[in-house]
Amino acid sequence: MNRPILTLLCLATLPYLTLAQQPLTQLQHRFETYQQQHPTEKLFVHTDRTTYTAGELLWFRLFYVDGSTHRPLDLSKVAYLELIDNQQKAVLQTKVALDTGRGSGSVVLPTTLPSGHYRLRAYTHWMKQTSPEFAFEKLVTVVNPFRKLGLAAPTEAPALDVQFFPEGGNLVSDLPATVAVNVVDTQTGRGVNSGGVVLTQANDTVARFGPMRFGIGTFSFTPSAKNTYRVLLSGGKTKSTTYSLPVIYPTGYSMQVGQSGDQLRVTVRANGVGANSPTVYLLGHTRQVLTLSAAQTMSGNEAVFTVPKNQLGEGIAHLTVFDGAGQPVCERLWCNRPQPGLLLRAKPDQATYASRAPVRLDLTATDATGKPAQADMSMAVYRLDSLQAAETGTLPAYLWLTSDLRGTVESPDYYLTHTGPEADAALDNLMLTHGWRRFTWKAVLPPKPSPVSPVVDLPERRGLVVRGRVTNARTGAPTADVPVYLSVPGKAVRLYSTRSDSAGLVRVELPDLRGTNDLVLQTAAPDTTYRVELLNPYTETPATTPLPPFDLASSAAESVRERSLAMQVQTSYYSRFVNPPTPPSRDSSAFYGIPDERYNLDAYTRFTVMDEVLSEYVPGVAVRKQSGHAALRVNNIPYRKLFDEAPLMLIDGVPVFDTDKVMALSPLKIKSLDVITRRYFLGYATIPGIISFRTYRGDLAGFQPDARAVVLEYDGLQHPREFYAPRYPTPALQASRRPDFRTLLHWQPHVQTNAQGNASLTFYTSDQEGTYLVVAQGLTPTGQPGFTQQTIVVQGGLK
C-alpha cells in the first residue's frame, strides 16, 4: 500500500476514533467529579465479645477509615451506634466521638432486654444520607436468664430464599450466559448446599449444577426467548422444588468475565442493539478509584477487552459496560484477593495459667516483608463456651470484602484466608450474587443538570451538629430565613444562633456537648406563625437484613447458668469498682466571655422585686413602661446612649422575649446578673446588648420557657469510661476471699506498637477455668488491616 493511500485511510478513520473517545472521556470526567464530591467512609466496630448476659457492659472500638484507601480518616467527628431488635426498633442508641480515625466507648445492656439476636449498627451522619447498607452491621446476642428465653419454634424443613443473578445483569435471548444461584435458609440466614437442574417447558435439561459452598453456585447456558425455564433444586436439606428464572429479554447486551493467568477477558455481546453505535466502553473502579477505561468496536455481535488483573488493584473492582450512547448496560464485580499487608501476632508468656495469675502478652506487628509496622490496635481476652465462639467478623474481611458487598456474607474470612481453585470459584460466585455499588449511575450521569441544587447536609467535621426544621405553623411548609436560638441551660451560659435555609433546616454545632442535657430550641421572636422542631439524629431507615431467629441448643443450658452466676457475682462484689463514665472538665464561662458588668446579688441588699434590683444596682439597664408593659433598654456604652431596641434577655442561657415574665422573676432565685453594654454578634444575629440572669443551680429555678419552644432531653457524645479488672500482685490479694468470676479478662481499645512494631501488656486471670481467646485487630497509618487470635488456658479455678 503506497503512502498517500495509507495517509488517506488514517485521515478517514480519525474522526471516528475521536468520536469514540469523546464519550469515554466524558464518562471518566463525570465519574471522577462525582467521586471527588462524594467521599466515602467506612466504620468497623470491634466489640469485646459477641454474646452477652443482660446487665453486662458491651465495650467497643471504632475504626473509621477512608472508603477508598482504608487510611484513618479525619472527616466526621461523630459516630452513631445503635442496637436494633428483631422488630427494627432501636433498644440502645449512643453517640461516640471520632478522633483521627478512631473512637471507643461502652453501653450497658439493660436487664430488661429479652434474650435474642440484635443488630449492632454504626454510621456517621454523612453515611446516613445514603443507603442504609453503608452502615456497619454486626450480629450481637444477648441472653437474659431472668426472663423467658423465647426460643424459635422448630421447623420441619427450612424455608428457602432462592435468587438468580445473571452475570452482567440480564438474560438476553441467544447470548451465552452464566447465572449465579444463591440458596439461603431463611430461618438461619445460612446458605444451603443444594444442587439442581435447569429445565425447559418441555422438560429438556439445559444445565446442571452441583452442591455449592455457602449455598452459592453457577451454571451456564444460552437462553432463548422462545422457551421458558425453571430450576429444580434437590439435595441437602431441601425438598425438590422448582423456581423460575429471571425474564429473558429479546434484545440487549450481556457480559462474561473469564481469566487466563494474570489477565481478565471481558466479553461483551449484543443482540438486536448497537447497530448504529457499534462502540462499547468498559469502565473499572476499585472502591470508587478509577482503574480502567477502554473502548472497543463490536465485531459482529461481540467485543473483547483484555485487562491485566493488577491494573484493577486489590479488593473488589466494579466493571461496567456502556453502550455507544454512554448508558450503562452491564455490570459485574471482580475481586483480586488482597495479600496480607499487616501481620499481627499475640504471644503470651505461657500457654497455661493458674487462677489470679499475671499474663504477659507481647504483640508484634510487621508488614508483608517482615519489617516492623506501627499499628493502632484494639484487644480483647474472653472465655469461650457453648454461647461464645471465636471471632468471625474481622477488620481485614470487612474492609476488603463485606463493606463493599450487599447483604450478609457467610464466613467472610474464608474468602481471604483460603486459596486454590475451590476458594477462587467461591470468591467469584460471591461477586456474582452480592454485587452492589455505593452510588447509582443515574446520579453520576444525569440526563441534564438539575435547575435546583439539592440540599446536601455536610459531614460533622467539627463535632456534634443538632438539626431542626422551621415550618409555617398554619401550612406546615418549610420556612426559610427565620432566626433560631438553641440554648443548653446550665451554669455555663451556652447559646447558639442560626438561621433556617431554603428547606427550613437549621444546624447548630455543639462540638463539646457530652452526656444528657436539656436543650431549648426556639425562633428568635415571639411570632406564632413559625413552628420549630428538633430532628432525629439517628437514621429512621430500617436495616434491610433480617435477624435470624434466636435459638439455643440444650447443651447451652450450663453456659447460661454459669454466665448468670458470673454476672450476679461481679455486680454484687465489683459494681463499686467499675469506673463510671468520666465527664471531662467543662468551660464554665459564658458564650459572651467576660461581661461588661457583673453583679453578684448576694453582695447587695436583697430586694424581692426585679424592678427594684435593676433600678437600684444595674446602671447599665434602664427600666421603662410602654403601653402598660415593662420595657428594658441597655446602655450602648461606646456611643453613650441607650439602644433603641430591646436587649436579648437570658435566664441560664435561655432567651426570654416577654419582658413582663422577666420582671416577674423572684430576684431571690437569681445568683448573678451579667450585662453586655455594647452591640454583640452571635452567628447571624446582631444583638443590641445582653442581660443575662444566672440562677444558683443553672436549672432555670422553675422558670418555664415560651410555650412555643421545644424543650427536651438530648444525649450528647458519651462520656468515656475506663475498663476495670482486679489485679493480684501480692500473695495476700491472690488469697482474697472475694470471688472473681470475670469471663472478660481484658479489654483495651487502643494499643499502639512502637517503632520496632512491639507492644506489651499485662492482665490477671480470674477464678473461672476454661479456654480464653485473645483477639487483636489493628490498622496501620497507610490503611493495612490486620487480625490475630490466640488461646490461653486457665486451670485451678472454678469449673
Image: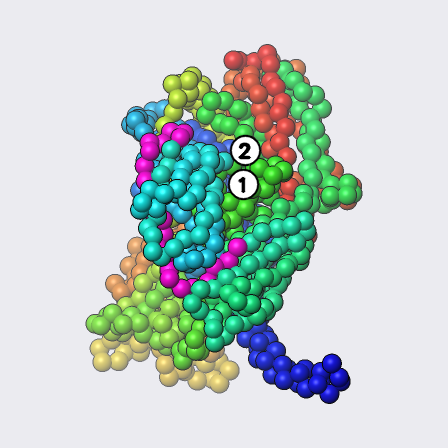
- The number of numbered discs placed on residues in the rendered structure image is 2
Q: Amino acid at mark 2?
A: Glu
Does the CB distance between marks 1 and 2 fall below 8 Å? Answer: no
Q: Amino acid at mark 1?
A: Ala
Q: Which residue is located at x 47 percent, y 59 percent?
A: 254
Q: Where residue 163 sits in the image (x, y, percent)?
A: 38, 45
Vertically, is 636 above or below 86?
A: below
* Residue under label 1: 426
Q: Where residue 497 sits in the image (x, y, percent)?
A: 42, 69
Label 2 secondary element: loop
Q: Is residue 330 left or right of residue 654?
A: right
Vertically, is 338 above or below 759?
A: below
Q: Is residue 446 left or right of residue 723?
A: left
Where does the magenta region start and end? 235-256
Residue 265 at least partly seen: yes
Q: Which residue is located at x 70 percent, y 21 percent?
A: 350
Vertically, is 661 above or below 774?
A: below
Hey, which quadrant is residue 423 in on the image?
A: top right
The disc placed on residue 391 is: 2
Q: CA distance from mark 1 to mark 2?
A: 21 Å
Which one is in front in this view, the residue at disc 1 or the one at disc 2?
A: 1
Vertically, is 98 above or below 2?
A: above
Please name whichever residue, 310 or 372, is drawn nearer the observer in this view of the structure. 310
Please name whichever residue, 597 or 679, is drawn nearer the observer in this view of the structure. 679
Q: Is residue 245 left or right of residue 281?
A: left
